[in-house]
Structure formats: structure tokens, C-alpha cells
Amino acid sequence: MGNNKDKTKLSPWWKGFLTSILGTTISIALTFGTTAIVNSREAKNARRLTAMMIIQDIDNSIETLGNIMEHEEKSYNATQYAINHIDSIAALPDDTLNLLLQYIMPGMWMSTDMEFDDSKERIFHSSQDSWSTLNDIAFVNNVESFYKSRHVLQRLLKTGDDMYYWIKPISKEEAIHDIQSGILTNKDKFISNLERRLKEPRVQEYIANYFKRIKLYQDVIEGWSGLNEENKFLMNITKEDLNEFKESTIKKSRAAKEEDVIGAWIDSVVVDHQVEYEYCKDHTFTMRAIHQVGHPAYFGKIVRTATLEGTWTIEGDSIIAIFDPSTCKLSADDSGITYPEEMRDSVERFINLWLVGDKQLHDLKQSITEQGVRQSRATNIDLTGNRLELIDSEKKTTHYKRKK
């Protein structure tokens, strides 16, 4: 036999099969490898977006606490002035008197500007499994510390837990008794009650503890601010990143132009009353305040409408309305009520005296004049042109939708 060794040769079919297997294996590896990379990148981006959301939440909480501190300072200054001028307290403006009562009595006031939003906290806690790197862990620890301290602060503001100088000097039971005695409906009783309360040692002690409350607010703001600066450093998030994130999450709207405003608008929140504005091309407008009024004398609701006319224009981003109190009118539609015949006189008397009577009309005109006939409200209109947001000088926001 010769020296040639046997050689194993693959048939064309086997070569194709192995090539197919090899190609499939490489394809699977590349597919899973690429998917892993994509998933990793998406997870990283998701963590970064969540981090920016939390950082923004902390900044918003700092702003909210600043509002609380500012309100505390304003209330303290008002009470100090009232105590130093106790004999002439009745001459103080009504809004100052109301501020004094709110400061010392529980359950008299609330504002969304001074409430913390916990929706972002829930999102953060639901995403904790995705944080993995050392920087992530340091960030998570910071955020946990922030939310814990915010909870403590919220308890202080609501109940005075752990620090007695947050507890309002007037108890809830006393507040209910005072209100039921008529202090909110009788000016003389209101003034007398306020004078008596401001002289009480416990009230004066609460006012004196103002400095302790302010010091804690300042310390908390400083702590939160420093913690959030560290968060930005840990997650490599710049001011420009946050601005871009904020811009991408805010509502899409713009200031309204004259042609946007023309037409009829109704307020979006409708319960038993509704406000409607009709802006005309000639820069006149009509406002209608529509109330549904119930009464034990009849079944159903009477629809009372107060109308007021004026002129309007757009200046910058604001709509300026000039009311004309002389155009104010009152009307009542009783077609939606029923009542026994023996109640007819009572119903008619109620309508004529309390709904459309001369005194009601006079008081309404006087109220419009006293509040100021010129109204300026900043505008935002959505991209559809059918939803309008108006913001007054006190930052009160009202939303309207275009009337079809």
C-alpha cells in the first residue's frame, strides 16, 4: 500500500449545514450582544431621566419650603404690628386681619404653593432595583435621606410632632367654638376675638417661637440645597441638562394673541356655577357668572346670571380687561323649579330680594368697583387653541375651554 493516508472529506451538503449552523450561532451571539447593549443603554438613560426628575423634585421642594418660610415671616410681621397697635387693630385691612387669624388658629387656611408633591417619590421608590453603580448608590442614599427629612418636616407642619413650637396656640376645639360663635360673619366679634387672643401668653409664646421655626427652615433649605448639588455632581447632570429636561416635560403652550382670544370661553371646573367670557372683535367683552341656586322653598335649581361688560386688549403676554360696573345686570330663570302653590309668595320674595333685588345689584357693582375695574391676567394657550390659562397678579390660575 502506498504512504497516502486516508483523508476525510465533507460532502457539499455537510459543508452547507455546518456553515448554516456557524452563521446562525454567530447571528444569535450578535443579536443577544446587541440587545444587551441596547438594553443597557436604555436602562442607563432611564436612570438618568429618573435622576433629573428627582433632582427637580428636590429643587421644587426647596422652593415650596421657601414659600412656607416667606408666609411665616409675613404672618409674624403682621402679628407684631397688630400687638404694637392693639388699640387700633380694627383699622387694619381685612386681608391682614385674616392673616393674623390664620397664623394662630388651625384649620383656617391652605395653599397648594405650600404643599409638597409626593408623586415623584413614589416613582423613585418603584425604580430602586435599577440603580447599580457606586455613584448610583450614593445618589439613592442622598435621595432617601431627603425624602425622610421631608416627611419629618411635613409632620411638623401638620401636627407639630416632636417640636411643640409648631403647634398652633388655639386648639381645634376652640377654633370650632369661635367660628360657631359667629366671628367670621360679624366684624365686631372678629375684632374682639382677635384682640383677646393676641393678648394671651400662649399666643405670644407661639409668635415668639417664630425665630426657632425660621432657623429650622433655613437649616433644612441649606441641607437640601447642598445635597442636591452633590446629586448633580454624582450623576454628572448640568444646569443645561436640567433646563432641557424641564422644557421637555412642561406643557406645550404659548402666550395668546388677539385672534386666539376672540370667541366664547367657559371655565373648565363646573359644579354649581360657571363663568363665561365672550371676547368680540371690536375689543368689547361680556362676562357671565352663572349660578345654580337651591332653596328649601322649592325643588330644583334657579339659574341666576350676572352679566358684566367691558373692553379688552392684549398687552405683551397678558389680557387686560376694563370692567364697566354700570353695565352689570342680574337675572333669574326659575323654569327649572317646582313648588307648592302656597309657597309661591315665598319663592318670588326670595328671587326678588336675594337673587335679583336692587340691593344685590348695588352690592355687586360696589364690589366690582372696590376690587378694581382693571384686571390683568397672563395668558397661556395650548397648541389646539381650545384651552386657555389665565394667571392673575396673585398667581391664581384659572383654566377655560373654548365654548362650542
Image (spheres, helix red, strand yellow):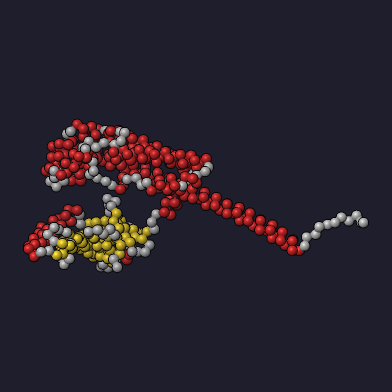
Quarter occupied by residue 357: bottom left
Q: Nearer the viewer, residue 178 or 222?
A: 178
Q: Name the residue rendered at 12%, 63% in the picture.
A: 339
Q: Residue at x 15, y 36 (%)?
A: 196
Q: Position of residue 143 (x, y in %)?
A: 43, 41
The residue located at (20%, 54%) in the rendering is: 372
- From the viewer's perspective, is 154 left or right of 197? right
- Residue depicted at 57% across the width and 52% down the height: 36
Picture coordinates of residue 157, whole percent (x, y):
30, 39
> Quick one: which residue is furthest to the front in this view?
1
Asked whether 303 or 298 is in front, the reply is: 298
Residue 306 lies, with reference to residue 71, above or below; the image says below
Q: In the rendered image, is residue 236 in sight?
A: no
Decide if residue 174 is in sight here. yes
Q: Position of residue 395 (x, y in %)?
A: 29, 51
- The front one of 336 and 45 is 336
Instruction: Locate the C terminus and report the quarter of the image it occupies.
Output: bottom left
